[in-house]
Amino acid sequence: MKSLDQIRAKYQEEYKNKIARNRIVVGLGTCGIAAGGEKVMAAIKEQIAARGLDVDVDFSACIGMCYREPMVEVALAGAPSVVYGDIFPDKVEKLLDSIVNKTPVFEWAVMQIPGDAAPYEGIPVMDTSPYYEKQVRSVTSRLGRTNPESIVDYMATGGYEGIEKALGLDRMAVIDEVKKSGLRGRGGAGFPTGTKWNFVYGAPGDKKYAVCNADEGDPGAFMDRSVLEGDPHSVLEGMMIGGYAIGADEGYIYCRAEYPLAIKRLNLAIAQAEEHGLLGKNILDSGFNFTIKIKAGAGAFVCGEETALLNSIEGLRGMPRVRPPFPAIKGLFGKPTTLNNVETYANVPFIIRKGADWYSAMGTEKSKGSKVFCLTGKVNNTGLMEVPMGITLRDIIFSIGGGIQYDKKFKAVQSGGPSGGCIPAEHLDTPIDYESLGALGAIMGSGGLVVMDETTCMVDVAKFFLNFTQLESCGKCTPCREGTKRMLEILQKICDGKGEMTDIDTLELLCRVVKGSSLCALGQTAPNPVATTLRYFRDEYEAHIKDHRCPAGVCSALLTYTVLADKCTGCGVCLRACPAGAITGAKKEPHIINPALCIKCGACFQKCKFDAIVKA
Amino acid sequence: MGACMCGNEQSTQDEALAKLLDQYRDYKGGLIPVLQEAQNIYGYLPGEVLQKIAKELRIPFSKVFGVCTFYAQFHLKPRGRNIIRVCLGTACHVRGGSKIFEAAQESLGVGQGGTTEDLRFTLETVACIGACGLSPCMMVNDDTHGRLVPQKVGGIFDSYQ
């Protein structure tokens, strides 16, 4: 077999030389670009050229702190690398001054990565900073640290060591190693990856496929996007190892079309791997052939379901198939197929390289390793994080996430997207693993965590998710197609203040029926948001029905707006803002809202500068 | 149909389609990429283009139409030069995404799925674009705009012609 040692040594040298120079690295993941990262990078390049500075400009992907984008790292030779947040083009000049003066801009610094240099005082060190202290960085170790479009960076940091090692092993030995690591599917269901590979390995057939599910459709989840944009080669390497283990010679990545940057970087990575003889025929003279193709999704949430995804790759409508036969026996184009999620594949090179024992040392008894989560919603620090399995929700939300925005009260965290459930405050100390979350009625899911505070109405949240699943139901089986629609109608009725107590019983019945009789996971899990909100927030449903009141002040049909006479200055702003002409009052006299005319749009409430309008 | 008939443009489009179909004739599962690229060529999927695809790829027209209407990405009517997708995912929902959508509707004078008369904009909603850390957010073409407030929306549109 051909060895990669020579080229790796060359790339390590190149990489070492690159990071030894004065560098500015701009975070250019989708989030960084959305926050203006490209403009910042252009400004940096322009000013470096104008001032004739000897500084290289490079880019990386998302380091995880979405709430501080655009982020820029300044790495000077022999000094700690300093990461700055909220850097907009107008701040570039001062940032470059700091390079000339060799003193960081302390007030903008988010953290530092000292490396071998002595750390600066007054800037948190990344590993012990509040955001990263409780995190581990393995799958995400290259995110924000290397250039995702450079195979040099990838190979210099251990990349493609896994496939090299795997090709020297017996195929079954690779599967055993993955089994021993305890790795379970990171797409949400948590099926043991090694066992799945073993099924496909044992399935009769001379043609087999390895497919990567990158159709990350759960609203509130962007782990896969971040990994694809930040470390695309790791996903390719994981697929190669999986392909080798099961005996496949072709791989497909099914990526949703809403991720153009991920698709671009994957295409680039595939071309680089092909150039290096890592994809194609007779890889490293081992006799193993493997190619990878990308299929862009066309906008259907149900295609995240494995059999629907296979149909979509085949050019059909993305409707789920009846199982059995399972894809391991009869999958893509009728051949044995393994389907794994992006994060699952990205874990594999690390497991093969560092060993199953290294991996299984992290996590709990039944859920090994780490998990990447996306923390969003009403929390201070929104972003991407990788934590060891078994960490509590409290640690994630309050330590890493920095607590609730505007010091409001925590109400619930929604785990697992439309298939998941809302977990209330009393269960915040639950350790995160597949079984514990399942016991609460939620699921691990792909890793989206949406935090909700006291101003979030749980009936409205349930309605939001049912609206989503109802729209995305493919319509093939009746329980999902009709059940989600009926549940949505009932929830709408409750939000409109027209609900009856028997509606709750009907909802519970429908939850059981849809869960028990739908064809695929989309339908089987669609009732979870309703079931969990009914379980933990029944009082809110009852307040809507019995008292015609929305405790969180969200459901507009149940709100009334009134003017507080003692606070109203009679400025007339609300009167002019009201589209319904429901507000009257003389100048400098307290105004009055006529409830018969009020359409509850909230325009007056938003416009009032004196907090003189209240909704209840 | 609504396809542009002004001579040159149409023949280049038809040429591009013919080339595309040649490329995918013996490709397993090629229908979806063909539809995606055909839509890139024409801006939408006119009826006669669908018929041509069905005939050339030897797939029943009913199947082509079925696939076309199953996926949210395919469009049977002309669309604006700039596609606005306002995110109404969970994270955006709890941070006021619907207010952004209202502001976009107001600014453009069209509703969900609508196209402005000058074909400059088409307004759509999307269930999540994965930029939840910057919610509420929206995409204009391939550009993602985050941390929106309703007042900012109209100004963003101004920069797209």
Image: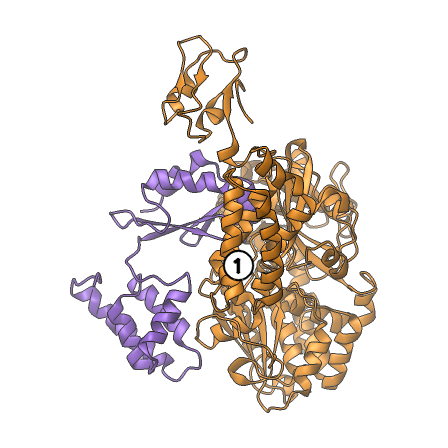
Chain colours: A orange, B purple
Q: Name the kind of residue labelled 1 in the image.
A: Gly
Q: Using the image as rendered, state which of residue A368 and residue B134 is in the foreground.
A: A368
Of residues A520 and A409, the one drawn nearer to the viewer in this rendering: A520
Which residue is more in the foreground, B42 or A364?
Answer: A364
What secondary structure is found at the residue carrying circle 1? helix
Please identify the quarter of the rendering in which residue A152 is found: bottom right
Figure check: A415 above or below A587: below
Which quadrant would the N terminus of chain A be assigned to in this image? bottom right
Q: Quadrant of the C terminus of chain A?
A: top right
Q: In this view, does A442 lie to the left or right of B132?
A: right
From this viewpoint, is residue B61 visible?
Answer: yes
Residue A69 showing in the rendered view: no
Q: Residue A396 placed where, x, y %?
A: 73, 47
Residue labelled with disc 1? A483
| Residue most extreme to the front | A502
Q: Residue A537 at what x, y percent from top left?
A: 67, 43
Mark 1 is surrounded, within 10 Å at the Cα level, by few (under 14), some (14 to 19) or many (20 or more) other residues, namely many
Q: Where does residue A307 sit, x and y in percent of width and height?
A: 55, 73
Count of labels in the image = 1
Dot 1: chain letter = A
- Residue A531 image position (x, y, % from top left): 64, 52
Q: Which residue is drawn at 52% across and 69% down?
A: A254
Is residue A398 depicted above or below A13 in this figure? above
Snapshot quadrant of residue A519: bottom right
- Camera-nearest residue between A110 and A419: A419
